[in-house]
Image: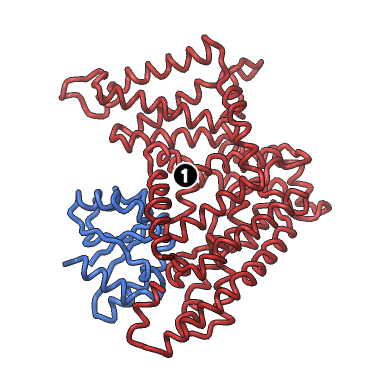
Chain colours: A blue, B red
Amino acid sequence: MKVLFVCSGGMSSAIVVNALKNEAKKHGQEMEVHAIGTNEVEEELKKGWDVCMVAPQIKHRFNQVKKHADEHNVPCGPIPPQAYTPLGGPLLFKALNELKK
Amino acid sequence: MLSKFVDFMENKLSAPMARLSEQRHLLAIRDGVISSLPFIIVGSFFLIFAFPPLPESWAITKWATEHAAGILIPYRMTMFIMSLYIAFGIGYNLAKSYKVDPLSGAQIAVAALLLTITPSVVDELGFVLPMQYLGGHGLFVTIIVSIISVEIFRVCKQKNVTIRLPEQVPSSVSRSFEALIPVAIVIILMSIITVVMGVNLHHLVDKLAAPLVTAGDSLVGVLVPVFLITFFWSFGIHGVSVVGSVARPLWEVYLVNNSEAVADGAETIPHIAPETFFQWFIWIGGSGATLGLVLVMLFFAKSKYMKSLGRTTITPSVFNINEPVIFGAPIVLNPLLIIPFIITPLVTATLSYIVTSIGLVTPTHIMPPWTLPAPIGAYLSTGGDWKAVVLVFVNIAISALIYLPFFKMYDKKMLALEHGDSETHTEEKGIS
């Protein structure tokens, strides 16, 4: 599965990327996760992603990101604030699975 | 009671303000300025090469001083004329947000900026442009003319005031023809102002902006954005990205003016508060000066959760990435940690401002990438002032001291939770 993380500059979500990958491995899933900044969203979504998740610190830009995601029929949801840490893998994995439904 | 207050602050204050920063033109300015940062970062490093922080008697220092003018040429063509890059960036992003051709928008903005300057004829050289108007001094004019010119372009486009060619013509050709009328309007308008009326927009705007430039460089001008940034983060909103949309142009003007002073060998460096001042002296470990908090976590945590959070967040914190701390601890919506999160930077900002203004620490004038560890960043940013490094360590110590009592109270709470009902504690972690 290909998961796209969006945060302010793509820096902080890079840390959470590994948390999600490791959690997915525990569940026997291979996951491709990529972190980008908001200004790259429009272009990046064209490349085909399964899910798009938006970091909590840019929740004021969530609707804008969701609009782009909707155009490409990519399910898009917020990353829960408590999951946005290197220890947040399990919570993040749960949120991701709910989003996919 | 408290939750009502928090609700009110979040929904009535921080959220609307954050949305305001998403306004189309502010967004275009923000992205335009940010797009120029690589050129500013790389360009500013040539100042270090020209004035290396080494003993004056060394051969390499002597060589660099002799050849400073040459070494500084890459700086002159990048950071020194940053407004040219920013005009392109603003024009591009604003046009893109209107869904009109971004490249045309960028070019029109550059033309509008260039037409605010009058070239003069110099013997042997021919036509010469005064470059300083393309630098820090020209940034306000750049923002204004870039926006006006792209507005003209997109109104023409939307009202179909364009020359359209038959469909058989390749799109790249027809696109350039579509821009003909708006380009003509912008060029004629700017020529009337600069050439016919003889108005120097830069002098005019410099006068109007002067009070703002002074205010932003005062102690209050430093403390207000510092407070606002941690205020936004307290609700989990990226404070720098909100406040920076408005303040960054001013911060870049300070930086470029400072770098110019150094490049010209001036005695004093004019400004205290470029963005680099905030980055290297205040936001050590990220917004809220949280490196101190993470160190306290590492050495004093009793609860399992805080111990492991300290261990996993120390590395990103050294490189000034602290979202894992802000959302992990969490600081967001957690009054116990919000208090030191807001107080600490106000204290370290005041101290840093004072020691810089009395000349103890060199004002920052070089922009290293923000992910460098703070002592290195501060050293480079001040052109190699070891006292800046001392200031960084003092600020880290202050931060740790202020966070310590609050952290201990919070850690005790977490420990009680871990010993108590182990089934519910994972849920409560995030909300407490």
Disc 1 on helix, strand or loop? helix
Q: State the image coordinates of residue A99 (x, y, percent, origin top left).
A: 21, 65
Residue B23, quarter of picture: top left
Q: Residue furthest right?
A: B57
Q: Residue furthest top?
A: B196
Q: Residue under mark 1: which chain is it in? A: B
Q: Nearer the viewer, residue B374 or B176?
A: B374
Residue occupying the point 36% across, 27% down: B151
**Quadrant location of the N terminus of chain B in the rendered image:** bottom left
Q: Residue furthest front?
A: B1
- Above or below, B318 relative to B105: below
Residue occupying the point 36% across, 52% down: A60
Q: Nearer the viewer, residue B259 or B128?
A: B259
Q: Residue furthest bottom?
A: B419
**Quadrant location of the C terminus of chain B in the rendered image:** bottom left
Residue B284, quarter of picture: bottom right
Q: Nearer the viewer, residue B245 or B161?
A: B245
Q: State the image coordinates of residue B165 (x, y, percent, origin top left).
A: 20, 20
In the figure, is residue B149 to the left or right of A52?
Answer: right
- Above or below, B55 relative to B171: below
Q: State the image coordinates of residue B61 (x, y, percent, origin top left).
A: 77, 50
- Above or below, B374 relative to A85: above
In the figure, is residue A72 to the left or right of B313?
Answer: left
Q: Which residue is mark 1?
A: B245
Residue type at the position of mark 1:
Ser
In the figure, is residue B330 to the left or right of B256?
Answer: left
Residue occupying the point 19% across, 24% down: B169
Q: State the image coordinates of residue B214 (x, y, percent, origin top left).
A: 65, 37
Residue occupying the point 63% across, 33% down: B211
- Above or below, A60 relative to A95: above
